[in-house]
Amino acid sequence: MTQIIDRPAAQGDSPDPWEPILAPVTTPVSPGSVPVAAELTMVAAINRALHDAMAVDERVLVFGEDVATLGGVFRVTDGLSETFGSERCFDTPLAESAIIGMAVGLAIRGFTPVPEIQFDGFSYPAFDQIVSHLAKYRMRTHGDINMGVTVRIPSFGGIGAVEHHSESTESYWLHTAGLKVVAPSTPSDAYWLLRYSISSADPVIFLEPKRRYWTRELVDTTAPAPPLGRAALRRKGTDLTLITYGGLVATALNASDLAAEQGWSLEVVDLRSLNPLDFDTVAASVRRTGRAVVMHEGPKTLGFGAELAARISEECFYDLEAPVLRATGFDTPYPPARLEKVWLPGVDRVLDCVERAMVQP
């Protein structure tokens, strides 16, 4: 277990608070490190982001259930304990509230904790620590104490897991002032959004879409992606805007392909970070197309799609040709694995919304 000591000095102290954290690692720190540009899975990209953040700033600590000896249940933290030692990457008891409580204490002492909650449904025991302390400490101290904690959570469904292993928790965190909420959809975004998150002085809930863990992409660790709070236009279109994040971005792109066969041109907006939200990109797209469908995995009632639909209706009302529709999960508990595909919003559910929006007078 890491001993709590006074805050160590940052490497490469600079007036620019981003520089010490985001400086690229040009020399491999351990044997077998990947080059600065390589085709990586999302798991490998997150692992590389953790590795690079730990290499340039000795304050960064990684801990959680089975993250050191096992390397995490998805092997996301594989090799970090061997490379940086058991005081910087270590296993914790099976107690999520204690994990986040320890992260808060470490942040107060100047460390940069990156705790892992093993599965999304396991975050509920830590809810009090996250909402009551992690989210509020920086504001309560008028910014005197940074709360630079990045809570990594393998999230959402689509892998056929058992109960409590496929939850959509984003609405809880988005309703909590003081938290940044991030949901990457590609390996490259996973790398850079995690680097940016670890650099943030505010706490970040980093939701990793489990069903995209094994997708591959060329990741260049020397060419930064857009920062937190910047959405990405994944596909241009003229008839309707699909707005989503995380694992459903690939579903939206598939729906766009099929809609093209019907003669409909769909634009796909990947939010990337949910708070801060790049609503300017969303609004600009909706004003171009005149129609919008919002997608998320969680239940429909009070999901993030409801907030997006309301805001689009308020701010883009005179540009809309049809009501904003939502393709979401159902208002039931997450089902057993055999019914998962029926419950999750897939291409058919999205295209049903698209057809309803397109036939509006």
Image: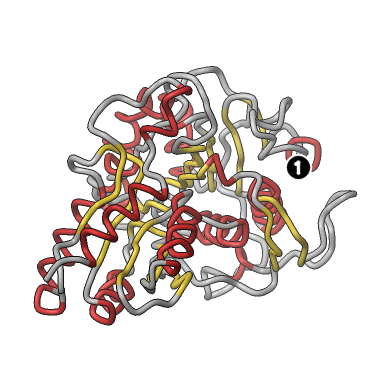
Q: Quadrant of the N terminus?
A: top right
* Residue 21 visible: yes
Amino acid of disc 1: Phe
* Foreground of the two, 328 or 122: 328
Give the SS element for disc 1: helix
* Residue 88 visible: no
* Foreground of the two, 297 or 196: 297
Name the residue: 50% across, 44% down: 209
Please name the residue that numbered disc 1 is placed on: 84
The answer to which image quadrant residue 290 occupies is: bottom left
Name the residue: 84% across, 58% down: 28
Q: Residues within 10 Å of mark 1 (few under 14, many from 20)?
A: some
Residue 114 position within the rendered picture, expressed as x and y whole percent measured from the top left:
54, 43
* Foreground of the two, 335 or 311: 335
Name the residue: 27% across, 60% down: 355
The answer to which image quadrant residue 332 occupies is: top left
Q: Is residue 61 above or below residue 94?
A: below
